[in-house]
Image (cartoon, rainbow, N blue to C red):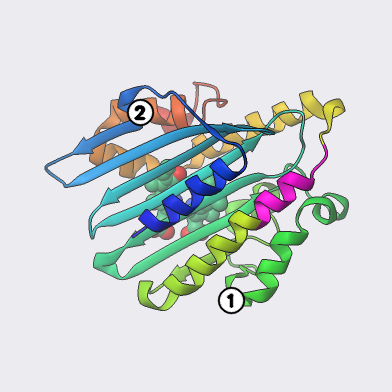
């Protein structure tokens, strides 16, 4: 389901001057042949982006995922790009979450970095979350212009694909315009660390990874690949 999205994303990373980084083979690829599931990941670096990870999970009709996060260099306080697309064909369910994940809330930051995303949300008002996701600490880790969709695949796929194209382009445009903020290096690093920690503790994918690829690999994948800046002591990794 997400092959085309994956290709579009990789092309955009390359267009930004991205190069592929090496990745341990067990992190780059893992399979469960009995369940017919394969997970593939790649790791990239681009000028101004220190780490751009991309993961695609192909579990057939049971589950398809495209997950990608771009972490800017610490010398840039611009938002993190977060993309989480999930499709469950057997249940005709699509979940799409895409955001410029802000390092701080507030008007000045939003005006500086979120205008492109705001314009996408304005073009596709059905992707605005409103109050629905407040339980998810939306105020801290998500922007007010988060793009969110949940519903039937047939109904949502065209909108999700269009908005995916738009957010990739808008993030690139924002990134190319953003100025570096070298005086903020320490603050940005600690905020990106907090982001990884928070995400590692709550990622709803841990159970899914464990059921397909085992607990040990799942823990390693979360610590070493998905959220390497999180500290190892984390409740979700210990259960
Ligand atoms: C939700 N993400 C989910 C869910 C799963 C995953 C299983 C619950 C889906 C459901 O409602 O049934 C799965 N997350 C994954 C997988 C990976 C992953 C397989 O990271 C593989 C690497 N999640 C992110 C990023 C964002 C994000 C970058 O990884 C930010 C845009 C958001 N995912 C996010 C949110 C929800 C979610 C906000 C909850 C949506 C809700 O409120 O229901």
**Which part of the image, by quadrant, shows the N terminus?**
bottom left
Q: Which residues are drawn in magenta?
A: 170-179
Q: In this view, does 87 lie above or below 239?
A: below
Where residue 27 appears, as percent x and y from the top left, is 35, 28
The residue at 25%/42% (across/down) is 38
Q: Name the residue under label 2.
A: 27
Q: Residues within 10 Å of mark 1 (few under 14, many from 20)?
A: few
Q: Residue at x 84, y 51 (%)?
A: 112
223 vs 158, nearest the viewer: 158
Q: Which of marks 2 and 1 is in front?
A: 2
Q: Does the residue labelled 1 lie within 8 Å of ligand 1?
A: no
Q: Can residue 204 be seen in this view?
A: no
Q: Verify whether residue 202 appears in magenta.
A: no
* Percent position of residue 170, x then y: 67, 57
Left or right of 51 on screen, residue 20: left
**Residue 198 tag number:** none
Q: Residue at x 46, y 41 (%)?
A: 54
Residue under numbered circle 1: 126
């Amino acid at each position: 389901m997400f092959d085309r999205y994956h290709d579009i994303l990789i092309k955009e990373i390359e267009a930004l001057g991205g190069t592929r980084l090496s990745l341990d083979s067990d992190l780059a690829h893992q399979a469960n042949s009995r369940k017919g599931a394969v997970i593939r990941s790649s790791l990239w670096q681009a000028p101004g982006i220190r780490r751009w990870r991309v993961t695609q999970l192909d579990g057939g009709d049971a589950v398809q995922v495209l997950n990608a996060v771009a972490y800017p260099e610490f010398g840039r306080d611009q938002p993190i790009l977060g993309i989480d697309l999930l499709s469950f064909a057997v249940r005709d369910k699509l979940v799409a979450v895409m955001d410029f994940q802000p390092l701080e809330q507030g008007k000045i930051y939003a005006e500086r970095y979120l205008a492109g995303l705001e314009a996408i949300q304005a073009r596709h008002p059905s992707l605005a979350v409103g109050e629905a996701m407040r339980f998810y600490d939306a105020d801290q880790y998500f922007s007010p212009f988060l793009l969110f969709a949940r519903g039937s695949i047939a109904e949502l796929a065209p909108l999700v694909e269009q908005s995916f194209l738009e957010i990739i382009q808008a993030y690139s445009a924002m990134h190319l315009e953003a100025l570096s903020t070298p005086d903020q290096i320490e603050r940005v690093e600690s905020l990106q660390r907090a982001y990884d920690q928070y995400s590692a503790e709550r990622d709803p994918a841990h159970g899914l990874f464990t059921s397909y690829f085992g607990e040990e690999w799942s823990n390693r994948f979360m610590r070493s690949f998905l959220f390497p800046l999180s500290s190892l002591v984390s409740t979700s990794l210990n259960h």
